[in-house]
Image: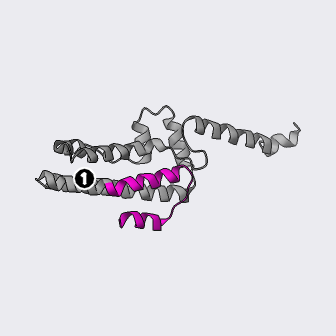
Amino acid sequence: MSPADDECGPSDAQLADDMAARAQRLRDANINPRTGLATDYLNHFNEAIMLLEMIPDIPECFEDFLGWQPMSYREHFAASNFKARDLAISAYDSSDPAVRAEFDNITATMTSILTTVGDAMRRVRHDDTRTILAEQAAGWVKPLVTLAGSMINGSSSDADDIDQIMNR
């Protein structure tokens, strides 16, 4: 290495090696290296969906659903036992701002649906009404989880996809 290399910082080859090593660490942690996002976060929403889907058969499960609390991506990983939680948060923070904003929009929509349905379930007194709310909410949130999963895996989406899902 020449003295000029020291003054200019790492070489292109060193940068490429560093990027390849980071990408491998992300893959090993089940974080998509292209998007910087991990599907583990979707488990937070899948838990709510599972509880909603139990309500028609076991009406008292609505109380379990009411215990579900919204969490941001960072909050989810900070509170999780995910072995690479710090890496997941770091990768999210350094992900493409446009991808992150679109992803956050989808997850905010899911959170809004789930919290609104939870508020409605707290007010109603009939199991039949709770069942209808649960079935509708699950029907709205499931496709959004699929859409978020597509984004995590590197497929792009747009607002039209969200509008189409919400208008079903």
In the image, residue 47 above or below residue 139: above
Q: Is residue 87 left or right of residue 23?
A: left
Residue numbers of the magenta segment: 139-168
In the image, residue 108 above or below residue 88: below
- Residue 76 in picture, x, y percent from top left: 40, 42
Which of the 4 image quadrants contains residue 143?
Answer: bottom left
The residue nearer to you, when weighing 25 against 9, is 25
Q: Amino acid at mark 1?
A: Ala
The residue nearer to you, when weighing 155 against 100, is 155
Which quadrant of the rendered structure holds the N terminus? top right
Write down the residue under mark 1. Answer: 134
| Residue 156 seen in the figure | yes
SS type, badge 1: helix
Which quadrant of the rendered structure holds the C terminus? bottom left
In the rendered image, the residue lying farthest to the front is 57
Which of the 4 image quadrants contains residue 132?
Answer: bottom left
Q: Is residue 106 magenta?
A: no
Residue at position x 56%, y 55% from top? Answer: 155
**How many discs appear?**
1
